[in-house]
Structure formats: structure tokens, C-alpha cells
Image (spheres, rainbow, N blue to C red):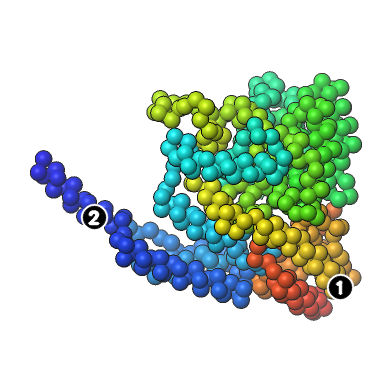
Amino acid sequence: MKKLIENILQLENISNELEPSQEQRNQYLDKIRNYSNEFLNTLDSKKTFNNSIQESDRFKITGDKISIEQIIDIYKEEVVEKGIIASSGGHLGYVPGGGIYTSAISDFIADITNEYSGMFYASPGAVTLENELINWMKKIFHYPDSAIGNLASGGSIANLIALTSARDKHKIKGDKIKNSVIYLSPQVHHCIKKALRIIGLEDTIIHYLKLDDHSKIDTKNLELQIDLDTKNGLAPFMVIASAGTTDTGAVDPLYEIGKIAQKMKLWYHIDAAYGGFFILTESKKHLFKGIELSDSLVVDPHKGLFLPYGIGAVLVKDKEAVYQSHHYTANYMQDAIGHNLPINPADVSPELTKHFRGLRMWIPLQLHGTKPFTACLDEKLLLTKYFRSAIKKKGFIIGSEPDLSISYFWFPSNNIDPNVFNKKLLEFMHQDGRVFFSSTIINEKFVIRIAILSFRTKLKIIDKSIEMIDECLTKTNAFFDNI
Ligand SMILES: *Cc1c(COP(=O)(O)O)cnc(C)c1O
């Protein structure tokens, strides 16, 4: 016994390293605070994109200790200063994320207290808080009180949860798979197709719908397709619309699609990962009419609410459909089973143990109120307008009037194939890196794409981007003149 105690105490001596003293904690926090302040204070003067394809060997884990100063140096030089600085207001490519400060400090508290937010029994407070966020979103999107939801890691998993519910509700399995039809836009986010594969629906019949001139689902075509398929003995079962496509930010005609889905008894899913929170703005809320007709809905707070990466949300009207796949009981969980207890996040998601991600959304909403979030979305819409008008003045062709804050443009080069010219132009823009743009293909044309959604994108950054494009245009012209 004495020997045993000695051994335990010896080990305790070593393992105590994992519980820093208050003094050490303060030292860590000072260093981290200094670094984060330096980072934020110099963010605007830094490049947004540092083109680098080298893998660093400085991450090696040797088992020995290194100091916090060394760690911050490695982080800064090898992580932050390479690739796209996603937290920069100059991030205008893909769909920019957020990274608001008050969310970061919320994560800190969530991690310190390490709440177990999967089960009501384990943390009634954490689960109630997360359920309240779901309730808040149900109100925003006019979902009934009886709907349920989940805070997932992002839009991809949120979509997976929704599509699984659709599958289970309509019992699409076995022989039914081959005969069932899913309707979607060719502009749907690729995570939808990935989810369909994961949940065993890749062998359903997937019909890509015709789009109108504004890249939106043509509802006449949808009706025709459903009629035709029904006549041919197939079983239409789900239609998927987007409220803000990734390519052009187009919002599908949600109401019309909803009416068709109702009439034909289809599961109606809407992917609003990027666009959903624009429903909060006066100027755009009309585009979301009919969103309440959907059976399931995905929206990404790490996009439209400017939170740091790691939170997407799903709402589903049919609770049983969600439970079918995710609600599980096991002997070792018997203490956690109670009747009429609030929804457990673990019963609505493939995740059991998970990060207490609700706190990073709840604290900012409470601390700031919702007004600055809405103002920020309105600001992004006006900046999009401003950018389009400024770039047009420089001789660029701009895409048709965007629904939200994604648009595209290209330079109509005379002697050089515009696809070749604009690709080169984007290359120069990436080399420059002051702000970051991405590209896409629209009607077989290579176009440069702008997506304004970072809360840090401000008027002066848009001005900087115009200046940069102008300079890169000069370089591109010179490049082709010299060939
Ligand atoms: C970003 C996005 C997704 C994927 O969400 P993640 O959070 O990246 O997993 C899905 N659909 C749309 C429309 C998106 O913009």
C-alpha cells in the first residue's frame, strides 16, 4: 500500500504539469493576448493571401517541451501567414467566414468549464442554452415550435442530418432506392451530393433541374419533370433548393417550389448555409418568402452571423424523422434517459460528445444584441452594390444583379481570349494578395468572383480591392502586349 501511494504521488508530480498555476495561467494569457492584439491591430495592413505550397517541418512532435513563445512563433509564421487569412476583411473569395472576438472568448470559457453539451442530464444549462438558439432560429425562419434542430460543426453535417431525416421519413431503403427521385439544381453545394452518397442515396435517380437566366430553379421544369417521372412509374421524393447558391448567391423561388412540394408530397429541403441570415434584412427578406414551407433547413452561423468556423445549424419539422437515425439508447446511457426531458443534441446528430458550440453564438448575440449583426449584413449588400458600380466604371463586365452579396465580373479583352486573359488577371491578383478573390465558370466563361461576407470587409477594403484590380489589369495588359 505504501509503495502504491508513493508511486501515485510520483506520477502526480509529473502529471501536475497539466494543471498550470494561476501565475502560469496568467503568463500564458498575457502572451496569447499580446499576440492576438498584434494580429488584429495589423490585420488591415497585411496581405490577405500568401501563395505558398510548402509544407512546414516545424510542426514535428518530438515529445519534448517547447516554450509558449516558440509555439506562438511557429503558429504565426507557419499557420497564420500562409494561404488565405480567413479572418481578414480582404477575404472576398469562396464564401468568407467570420471570427468575431466575443465568440473566441466564449470558446475559451466553454473549454475551461468543458460542459458536456450532448445530454440534458449532464448539463441542463448548456443544452437549454443550445435549444434556445434553435428556438431563436425557428422564429427567424417561421418554423413551428414543434420543429427541432441541432448545432452541427458546419453546413455539411447540418445538411447530412436533414437529408438523413428525409430518407427516413420516406423510408427510402432497399428496393425503393432505385425508384426514388431527387430533384436538385446543378448549382447545389457539393456537400449535398456528398451527403447523399454517405447516406446511401447515390443510387436514387437524381434529376438536375433547368435554371432560368438568373441561375434559379425553373419551377415549370420542376413540375414537368415530376409529372413525367410519376407517369413513368418512378417515385419522386425530395426536392432541394438553395437560398443563396455558392456560385452566384442566387436564391431559388422558395415559395413556388414549396407549393409544388406540398402538392406532390415531396420532402422539401433548403440549403441556406450561405444566404439564410439575410432574411434579417429589410431589403432582402422578401426573397425568403416560402422558406417556412420547407421540411428542413440549413443555415451557417459561421458564415452569416460572422462566428469563427465550427458552427452550422439544421432545423427539421418532423422530430420523429430525425430521431429515427440519431436517437439511440445503450446500457451505459441508462442514467441519461428521462421522459419529457428537453431535446438532447446527441439525439439529433451523429455526434455524442461534442464541443459546447452554442456558447460561441449565444454570448455574442447577448453581448451585442442582434442589431449589429443585421446592420453588418445590410452593409455587405451595399458594399456589393458599390463594388459592382466601381468595377464597371473601370471597363469590366459585371454579372446580372445579384440576389445577395456574391457577384462576378470579367474583363472583355479584345485581342486575347477573355478566358485566358481573366485567368492571367486572377493570377496577378493572387500574386499581389492584398485582397483575395476566387473564380468560377458561368456559361462556359471564366469569371472572377466576389463574395462579401466577412464582418471586417469595410468600404476602405473595397476601395483597396479596386485599386489592386486596376494595377493587376495594367500588368495583365503589359503581359499580353509583350508576348
Ligand atoms: C458553405 C456552404 C455549405 C457547406 O457548409 P460548411 O459549413 O462549409 O460545411 C453548404 N451549402 C452552401 C450553400 C454553402 O455556402
Residue 245 image point, x, y percent: 75, 49
User: Farthest left residue?
Assistant: 2
Q: Look at label 2 and name its amino acid.
A: Ile
Of the 4 image quadrants, the one containing the N terminus is top left
Residue 393 tag number: 1
Assess whether mark 2 and mark 1 are in contact (beta carbons under 8 angstroms): no
Which residue is label 2 attached to? 14
Local SS, label 2: helix
Q: 60 or 230: which is nearer to us?
A: 230
Where is residue 89 shown, x and y percent of the image? 65, 67
Looking at the rendering, which quadrant does residue 427 occupy? bottom right
User: In the rendered view, would you say 47 is above or below 198?
Assistant: below
Mark sitting on residue 471: none
Q: Earlier in the sequence, mark 1 or mark 2?
A: 2
- Badge 1: few (under 14), some or many (20 or more) residues near its Cα, within 10 Å? few
Residue in the image at 45% along x and 27% along y = 337
Q: Is residue 310 visible?
A: no
Tell me the residue at 26%/53% (across/down): 15
| Alpha carbon distance from label 1 to label 2 | 67 Å
x then y, percent, for residue 401: 85, 58
The front one of 195 and 313 is 313
Q: Does the residue labelled 1 lie within 8 Å of ligand 1?
A: no
Q: Residue at x 55, y 70 (%)?
A: 40
